């Protein structure tokens, strides 16, 4: 592997990426084995299934009922419907109801399954994936989907200068030799390719945007998904209606889905308990126990890939000093954060990777709470007597405000004075990306079923995200991450990712704080709603029983 980077000197680079915050904003087969079963050279897979294997956390017994209008009460509005450039979760999860990729993530978040594709084969050299398209698929405007649409869609995402183009860096070219066949040619063997093709940004849109400009098209996008665009009153509500040309027979069950912008936690909860809305996205953690005891609703805590971090800007003194970073990381009682912030509904984080991600290493360390070690590390640092710094918190985020207060208190005994700065969320996010901060919280959820997305974003300084905007740069870690991209051997990938996780934890480039589930409140008449560990959901499977709006 030592010669790998002479062969592949520039494997993946991305444009400037938005860091996802919740609620202000933002996978993988089992530990590699299942992914490799799909991706191995010369292998093939096929599927004629028309639905997912998901199950609902709410009661879903009985025959699905057709009709009804479901409303999500969301903490914020979507930001964009341009799948190739948008990074906030609210937008992504709506886009996925309109456009669809060739493959989709499995219900457990650790694999992919054919979706707009029915199968594929891989050339002997592992550089060409020949993909067979599902027959009879139409766009919501009634136009048949063909290989030309797929080719155009992938090429547009690959070319995105300010978006997800980096995820498709390994793709050399896309061919459309026949109406129902697409060939994806790779520059080099690439372990995450099927997971990359399952990314929402690789969703299929009409060739040449149906004759429109990209900007005009994404004002009212057309796709093959279960729902189609109706209207978007920005800052108020976005509505999708049933796609009557949807390829899954009998689906979707609902007539429409509307996402409303309701930033107040109490208001969202009242809307669901009163029937004004059917799903509350991300209720306040303080209300979880109360909601569990309420028979009129179902409180779901879905396993997730969500991780909360404290980032250190290594371009600002004294955070280039590993001893300072380690001291702060050791000083944080993560179990106390889990109790105070998510009310026990989570677990302390030990790695950049969450446990739901393949190749997660439970033994990577993560510098867990130890006051003696914190004092010892600081004593060895460039600031043995402490220092003053600023922790930026976006306004309106009660979770981050709580964490900030706890961190401020925990660092004070070390002689570290933490000044909490509250900024408008957009300003805080902009400053974070441009390196105008000392310490700041960040959050991540996976978008594809492979760890490469997060590993590259978080640990490779040339990726465009500057190692999660911390400017962290450890050549040994970068080497391990890039080695894992180009081997399809599961054991080798695990070893590489173990190296990356362990060293990154030791370097404390961020303090990994906690992992938490996705909390949703559903009306008792909601059935079939399931959220994958990546945060996405299939609204074609959801139906409303009596009492629906």
Image (spheres, rainbow, N blue to C red):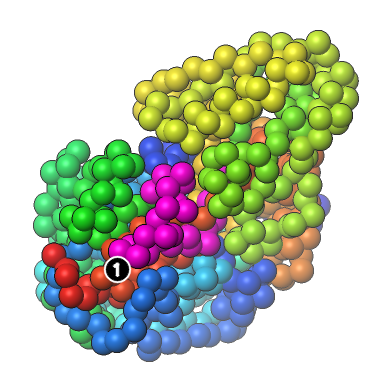
In this rendering, would 135 be left or right of 193?
A: left
At a point 68% along the width and 62% down the height, the residue shown is: 359
In front of the other: 117 or 365 = 365
Q: Residues within 10 Å of mark 1 (few under 14, many from 20)?
A: many
Number of marks in the rendered image: 1
Residue that appears at 51% across and 22% down: 392
**Considering the image in quadrants, where does the N terminus appear?**
bottom right
Which residue is tagged 1? Answer: 524
Q: Which residues are magenta?
A: 283-308
Is residue 7 depicted above or below 63 in this figure? Answer: above
Residue 363 placed where, x, y %? 79, 54
Q: Is residue 118 visible?
A: yes
The vertical placement of 168 against 59, above or below, is above
Which of the 4 image quarters holds residue 335?
top right
Residue drawn 70% across the image and 17% down it: 412
Q: Look at the image and tell me whether residue 26 can be seen.
A: no
Disc 1 is placed on an element classified as: loop
- Looking at the image, residue 271 sits to the left or right of residue 453; the answer is left
Q: Quadrant of residue 385?
A: top right
Q: Position of residue 367 (x, y in %)?
A: 78, 40
**Left or right relative to 272: residue 400:** right
Residue in the picture at 46% in, 46% down: 285
Decide: is 62 above or below 255.
below
Reply yes or no: does residue 339 show up in magenta.
Answer: no
Measuring from the top left, give residue 298's x and y in whole percent: 37, 64
């Amino acid at each position: 592997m030592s010669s790998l980077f002479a062969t592949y000197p520039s494997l993946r680079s991305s444009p400037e990426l938005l860091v996802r915050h919740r609620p202000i904003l933002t996978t993988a087969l089992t530990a590699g084995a299942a992914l490799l079963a799909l991706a191995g050279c010369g292998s093939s897979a096929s599927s004629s299934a028309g639905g997912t294997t998901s199950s609902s956390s709410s009661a879903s017994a009985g025959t699905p009922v057709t009709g009804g209008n479901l409303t999500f009460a969301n903490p914020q509005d979507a930001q964009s419907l341009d799948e190739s450039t948008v990074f906030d979760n609210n937008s992504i999860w709506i886009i996925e109801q309109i456009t669809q990729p060739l493959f989709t993530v499995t219900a457990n978040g650790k694999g992919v399954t054919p979706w707009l594709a029915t199968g594929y084969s891989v050339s002997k050299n592992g550089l060409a994936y020949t993909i067979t398209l599902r027959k009879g698929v139409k766009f919501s405007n009634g136009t048949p989907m063909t290989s030309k649409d797929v080719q155009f869609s992938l090429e547009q995402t690959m070319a995105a200068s300010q978006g997800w183009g980096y995820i498709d860096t390994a793709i050399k070219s896309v061919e459309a030799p026949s109406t129902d066949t697409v060939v994806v040619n790779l520059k080099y063997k690439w372990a995450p390719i099927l997971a990359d093709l399952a990314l929402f940004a690789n969703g299929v849109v009409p060739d040449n945007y149906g004759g429109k400009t990209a900007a005009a098209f994404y004002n009212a996008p057309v796709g093959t998904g279960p729902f189609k665009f109706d209207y978007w009153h920005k800052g108020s509500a976005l509505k999708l209606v049933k796609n009557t040309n949807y390829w899954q027979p009998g689906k979707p069950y609902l007539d429409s889905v509307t996402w409303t912008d309701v930033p107040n936690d109490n208001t969202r909860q009242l809307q669901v308990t009163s029937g004004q809305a059917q799903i509350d996205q991300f209720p306040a953690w303080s209300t979880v126990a109360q909601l569990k005891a309420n028979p009129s609703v179902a409180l779901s805590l879905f396993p997730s890939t969500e991780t909360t971090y404290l980032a250190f800007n290594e371009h600002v003194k004294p955070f280039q000093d590993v001893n300072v970073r380690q001291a702060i990381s050791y000083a944080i009682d993560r179990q106390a954060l889990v109790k105070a912030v998510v009310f026990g509904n989570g677990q302390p984080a030990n790695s950049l990777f969450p446990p739901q991600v393949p190749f997660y290493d439970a033994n990577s360390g993560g510098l867990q709470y130890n006051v003696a070690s914190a004092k010892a590390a600081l004593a060895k640092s460039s600031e043995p007597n402490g220092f003053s710094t600023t922790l930026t918190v976006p306004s309106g985020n009660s979770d981050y405000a709580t964490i900030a207060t706890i961190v401020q208190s925990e660092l004070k005994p070390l002689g570290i004075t933490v000044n909490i700065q509250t900024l408008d969320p957009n300003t805080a996010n902009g400053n974070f990306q441009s390196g105008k901060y000392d310490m700041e919280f960040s959050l991540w959820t996976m978008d594809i079923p492979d760890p490469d997305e997060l590993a590259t974003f978080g640990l490779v300084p040339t990726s465009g995200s500057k190692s999660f905007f911390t400017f962290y740069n450890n050549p040994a870690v970068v080497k391990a991450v890039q080695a894992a991209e180009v081997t399809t051997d599961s054991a080798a990938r695990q070893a590489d990712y173990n190296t990356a996780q362990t060293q990154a934890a030791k370097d404390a480039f961020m303090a990994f704080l906690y992992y938490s589930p996705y909390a949703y409140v559903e009306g008792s008449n909601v059935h079939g709603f399931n959220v994958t560990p990546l945060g996405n959901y299939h609204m074609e499977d959801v139906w409303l029983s009596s009492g629906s709006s």
